[in-house]
Amino acid sequence: MYLSYFGLSDNPFSIAPNPDYLYMSPRHKEALAHLIFGLRESGGFVMLTGEVGTGKTTVSRKLMQQLPHNTQVAMILNPSLSAIELLATICDELAIEHQTQQLSLKYFTDLILSKLAANHQLGINTVLIIDEAQHLQPEVLEQLRLLTNLETNREKLLKVVLIGQPELQQLLKRNELRQLAQRITARYHLLPLTAAEVKSYIAHRLGVANGDISTFSQGTINAAFRITGGIPRVINLLCDRALTLTFTKQLPVVQKHIFYAAAEQILGADVLKQRVGKRWTYLLVASFVVAVTVGFWLGRLYA
């Protein structure tokens, strides 16, 4: 509804993974560099973790764009599978023909290993990317480790990228998975955006849609960081709703109180109060410390 009102050519804050709106903050670029480095090493696994909505999918899509042209990628988006189901899915992703009546780990493992060897002979790299990897069962992870046993004198024939929430880190600390954990050549935990990055993020997405950062007041930008905690997905949701409310009220700029109203609608009054309350608590404590410090030195000065 608000596109023509603000002179926008497209919805700048859609949560759909549109590559045109891809924003690589310094943290995202660092995460990407870690993954690329890890894939070039001899180990079989690299790992990217982060809270929900921090942009792990953004990094993985950029990673796929930067893989060499001679790379075959298998992407697993739903890892809540048994070991056999996962191996069958890998076969599908790698275009390996298999018989549906064959349901043994050995059958699928042999097919995949043959494919890896054939790809190597043709000079093709094979990469397996697993999203939401925190849902993998330990026995499934162990099966993946066994797949990476096929190697040359220089490298593994299968590289595995594990992408997941922080629970993935805890999962890999289990004793039965210590061999797999030792094969992770690069790992990176993606943190939320900083205050400066939140402003750059909003400006970038508005710019792609032929908009301008002046659509949001500076107070609103500050509120966006405070309320969203720098989580890109939440920023998208709240900015979209704030633009809608601003259009409804026929205001020229998204003001802070409008953004608060959007946050209350999306996150709920309790969550909004908690996040804004943390800010006020911090300011109150800081003011108290300053007052005590000033009082102490004044007391010494006039003692």
Image: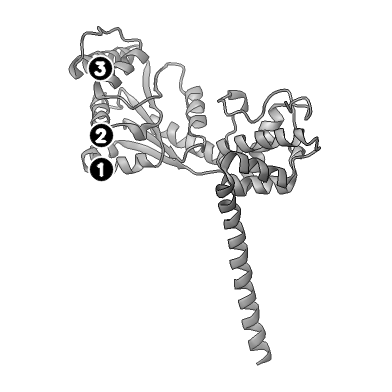
- Report which residue position mark 3 lands on: 113
Q: Which of 14 and 76 is in front in this view?
A: 14
Front tag of 1 and 3: 1
Left/right placement of residue 129 relative to residue 224 reads left
Examine the image and state in which quarter residue 249 appears. Answer: top right
Distance from disc 2 to disc 1, alpha carbons, whole Å, reads: 9 Å
Residue 255 in the image: state x and y as whole percent.
Answer: 74, 44
Left or right of 10? Residue 237 is left
Residues packed near mark 1 inside 10 Å, few (<14), some (14 to 19) or many (20 plus): few
Residue displayed at 43% across by 40% down: 188
* Occupied quadrant, residue 79: top left
Residue, disc 1: 174
Q: Which residue is drawn at 67% across and 49% down?
A: 222
User: Does the CB distance between marks 3 and 2 fall below 8 Å?
Assistant: no
Towards the viewer: 167 or 193: 167
Ranked by sequence position, the earlier of labels 1 and 3 is 3
Q: Residue 138 has which mark?
A: 2
The three-letter amino acid code for the residue at tag 2 is Pro
Going 58% across and 62% down the picture, which residue do you hit? 281
